[in-house]
Amino acid sequence: MTKLNINQDLKALNNQIAAENRNKFQSQGVYVINIMGSPGAGKTTFLENILPKLCSQLKVAVIEGDLATQNDAQRIEKIGVKALQINTNGGCHLDAKMIDNQLQKLDLDSLDLIIIENVGNLVCPATFYLGEDMRMVILSVAEGEDKPSKYPIAFLNADTVVITKTDLLPFIDVDVSVMRKYIAEINPKVLVFETSKKDGVYEAEQIIEYIIEQVRLKQ
Amino acid sequence: MTKLNINQDLKALNNQIAAENRNKFQSQGVYVINIMGSPGAGKTTFLENILPKLCSQLKVAVIEGDLATQNDAQRIEKIGVKALQINTNGGCHLDAKMIDNQLQKLDLDSLDLIIIENVGNLVCPATFYLGEDMRMVILSVAEGEDKPSKYPIAFLNADTVVITKTDLLPFIDVDVSVMRKYIAEINPKVLVFETSKKDGVYEAEQIIEYIIEQVRLKQ
């Protein structure tokens, strides 16, 4: 029971800082997306592909969370988008305080959208709120159909799910309609999008349009 | 600092129970493998494919760890191997006490090998020892080359790494020799194996032979 209470205290403290972050974002009209998913689900690749189009209409910054390395921030900076890297040094999720610590490095007033890529982990980030408007889960078809049932909390708390790598479907034993059914069983309200790479082109038009729409609604 | 100390206390307690588990396994001559990896890395599929061959030479039981569902234990029972399911109800890793709780359901004296499939998570299980002899990380090529660098603790503490789904290599932008290089940078001593599915046949001969050899060495 001690462990449980400690967890509850940590989460209550985190929720308090998340609420403060949310107030800051609200007062500056900045929309914030928290992207979660397994290692290798395709989170950074998704960002690399949606950011050029998002940046043609919005002022965007990215916060990258990883146990180690600057790899992901470097990938994002390469496409000309400001990216801050948080290294958790073994920590399994980002928390609201880590985000708060980064905010002084950003001119919130000049931004429309902050995208936070959480540590690759389908479990722990799901219960640590950061002050975000949208909680997005990225799920690769290569992970298999049943992951929503096996990792329900991430999907239960999500606003959007982006199914990635659908171009691999011909080569694996996965039916995306079954994956969608499992997602809906956990969370019937979540919006589900699909992305794929066809002839070298990453296709993610629907989710890009949806993000822009949501950012505009907040402004 | 409070958080850190609590973590250290929890891990010290876990290590103590893990040592008790290890003594039990040692006294009964049971070899234990702790399989870790991301959601969808192919852990259960790997087990489904190696168990028939292992069971022709060894007496084996499986302990499955998941946040929710009995899916994985059911998949293993289908191939005629005793499987116990632990549901962590949101918990991000198995701990030594959970394993201890299952041991009363197993006749250790009649077993050669226990395989524990941990919760799908490349972060948290890495620092919770269970009393195992071999720590195995399963890494799918679909997760990308750089995961060893980005999730170093799992690889640093591993004895073996099994790279899965190499049959997908023609369809993705991943070079398995680069993945091996990153693994070696983190842990030069770890043994790396590859598995693939060719013409519907799962190929994992090398790792099966290695496991049988290790079990025999303990007996």
Image (cartoon, coloured by chain):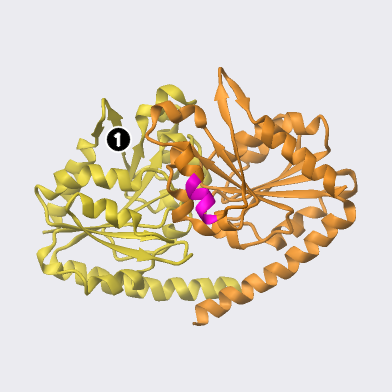
Chain colours: A yellow, B orange
Q: Is residue A31 above or below residue A191?
A: below
In the rendered structure, which segment of residues is drawn in magenta?
Answer: B181-186
Relative placement, left or right, of A29 versus B18 is left
Residue wearing tag 1 = A195
Quarter assignment of residue A209: top left
Q: Secondary structure at mark 1?
A: loop
* Residue under the image location 51 percent in, 77 percent down: B3
The number of discs equals 1
| Residue A4 coordinates in the image, percent (x, y) | 57, 70
Relative placement, left or right, of A108 versus A87 is left
| Residue B135 coordinates in the image, percent (x, y) | 66, 52
Is the C terminus of chain A in the top left, top right, bottom left or bottom right quadrant? bottom left
* Residue under the image location 30 percent in, 32 percent down: A196
Relative placement, left or right, of A150 versus B212 is left
Along the line of sight, the residue nearer the viewer: A95 or B143: B143
Q: Is residue B44 above or below residue B188?
A: above
